[in-house]
Image (spheres, rainbow, N blue to C red):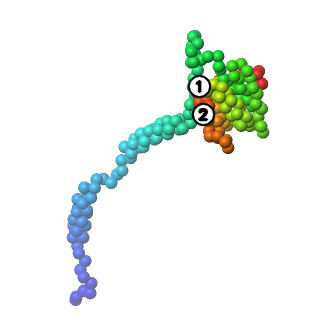
Amino acid sequence: MTSLFQAEPEYEEVEQRRSRRTRRLKRKLKGYGDGELNIVSMIDVFAVMVFFLLVGSSISASKLHTLNLTIPVASNTPSSTQADFQLAISLYDNKVLVSKSGVRTSINHIDAKVDIDSLSNLLRSIKAEHPNEERVSLLVADNVPYEQIIRVMDSVRESPPTEGSDAVPLFPAISMGDAEVGAK
């Protein structure tokens, strides 16, 4: 009798074919390595990158937010350029005191803000009297907002342009200090 079905291959033949195939695949994959990812070196690289990014960003941020201030020099002998003229601006929460060689002028705030126009006009007149002077001392009280300090510093460095004139450089060498507590 003939069988309708083909004879099934012996178990050993199937196993031998399978083993040849697996050996061939193993040989092919041997060149690719074991397929594991070594992340230790990658973590080391990221740690170094994070360090440099943090340091770099802090340095660049500090360069953006610096104020150019002049630190006063302590000296026992009066210099020839330091005649009797001393300009000091005391900034309080309700007014600005401009002291020119001991003579004080008071400028009151308008709507809780520094009257920049009056301060600029006064500083322009002082600059006209002393054109070679560039130094000023800015004395700030404890409760003055940072925004007000920056506005005053900007107006002390350079007078804003008006309709009839351009911006005028005034006193770019600013020294900062604390204002007198009882001088309000």
Q: Quadrant of residue 27?
A: bottom left
* Residue 47 visible to the viewer: no
Disc 2 marks a residue whose amino acid type is: Pro
Up-down: is 178 above or below 39?
above
Kindly identify the residue that appears in the image at 24 percent across and 86 percent down: 3
Q: Residue at x 62, y 38 (%)?
A: 167
Q: Residue 16: horizontal and vertical position, in percent?
A: 21, 67
Compared to residue 81, the image places residue 153 above or below, namely below
Q: Is residue 59 above or below residue 11?
A: above
Q: Residues within 10 Å of mark 1 (few under 14, many from 20)?
A: few
- How many numbered marks does the figure carry? 2
Is 119 on the left-hand or right-hand side of 175? right
Callout 2: helix, strand or loop? strand
Marker disc for residue 132: 1
Q: Nearer the viewer, residue 27 or 169?
A: 169
Q: Horizontally, is 163 left or right of 68 in the view?
A: right
Closer mark to the observer between disc 2 and disc 1: 1
**Which residue, given by chain and number where applicable, does mark 2 sit on?**
169
Against 119, is 9 above or below?
below
The image quadrant of residue 19 is bottom left
* SS for callout 1: loop
Looking at the picture, how far across and down is residue 162, in whole percent? Answer: 67, 41
Q: Quadrant of the N terminus?
A: bottom left
Who is closer to the viewer here, 168 or 92?
Answer: 168
Rendered image quadrant of residue 52: top left
Q: Nearer the viewer, residue 50 or 10?
A: 50
Q: Residue at x 76, y 27 (%)?
A: 106
Q: Badge 2: few (under 14), some or many (20 or more) residues near its Cα, within 10 Å? A: some
Q: Distance of mark 2 from mark 1, alpha carbons?
A: 11 Å
